[in-house]
Image: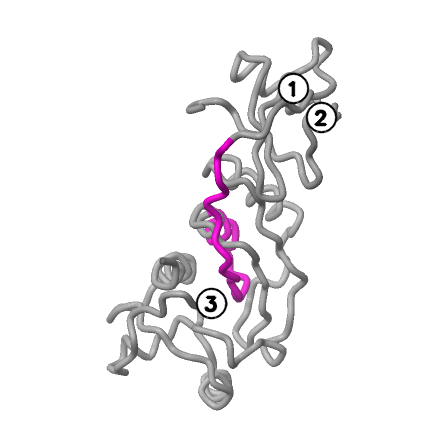
Amino acid sequence: MKNIPRIFIGKNITPGDKVAIDKSVSHYLVHVMRRDNCLVFGDGHEYTANLSGDGNFLTIGNQTPHADPSNDVCLYFAPIKKTDDMLNMATQMGVMRFVPVITERTVAHHINWDRMKKIVTEAAEQSNRNSVPEIATPIKFADLPFADLVFADERAAYGADLPHEFIGAKNILVGPEGGFSDDEFNALDKNGARGMSLGKTILRAELAAAIAISRVVK
């Protein structure tokens, strides 16, 4: 079903349901894509759907055989100026959940989280996912699940000998533009978090996130 537009509907989709849609969705289908059918998805499943004559609702058809390519990785991240780019890329890479983390050097404190939710929804629609990742409420650095974390460790760029991948890891942490503080590195090391090398150069946080995800996903 290549090139058929995909629309996120939400959970509890049932064939035969009539789902009310926003006028912007109707406009997109009729005037941009010039069609009255689409695919809808949510909660890991995808269905065919047809637009009503008045453009007010979609009638849900049969479930498709398309399996959700999403993974079960959770990305913990310090909000950055380009948080939108980071979440867009990570959504396309299949990340299941995002948890913002307030670190000592976090400078982006006024993120429009409603806009971020829209960005990850659109990224999920575009990337052929059947689910949209959750964006959790921001937490403090001290509340991280340290023992279960793999983190992008910039110390590799200064000579530290660190593993380059942790295939199968479920929780990744990426720091802010200014990196982790000494106290934060001490807390990560002391509490069992595992540092991962991303190479010998210092990367922008959004690129570091993408590379770290690629090194834990099978």
Lower position in the chain sequence, tag 1 or tag 3? 1
Q: Residue at x 48, y 66 (%)?
A: 170
In the image, 128 versus 111, the foreground residue is 128
> Which mark, by number, is residue 36?
none
Above or below 75: residue 86: above
Lower position in the chain sequence, tag 1 or tag 2? 2
Horizontal side of 124 relative to 199 (left or right) equals right
Rendering quarter of residue 63: top right
Measure the C-alpha gap from mark 1 to mark 3.
38 Å
Position of the N terminus, as image quadrant, is top left
Horizontal side of 4 relative to 8 (left or right) equals left
Total of numbered circles in the picture? Answer: 3
Lower position in the chain sequence, tag 3 or tag 2? 2
Above or below 124: residue 52: above
Above or below 71: residue 49: above
Question: Which residue position is annotated with label 2?
Answer: 21
Are dots 1 and 2 in contact, CB under 8 Å?
Answer: yes
Which stretch appears magenta? 65-88
Amino acid carrying mark 2 in the image: Ile
Amino acid carrying mark 3 in the image: Ile
Horizontal side of 84 relative to 114 (left or right) equals left
Horizontal side of 49 relative to 5 (left or right) equals right
Residue 134 placement (x, y as % from top left):
62, 53
Question: Which residue position is annotated with label 3?
Answer: 172
Q: Residue furthest top?
A: 53
The secondary structure type at the circle numbered 3 is strand
Position of the C terminus, as image quadrant, is bottom left
In the image, 153 versus 12, the foreground residue is 12
Question: Which residue position is annotated with label 1?
Answer: 26
Residue 73 placement (x, y as % from top left):
49, 60
Q: Residue at x 53, y 36 (%)?
A: 125
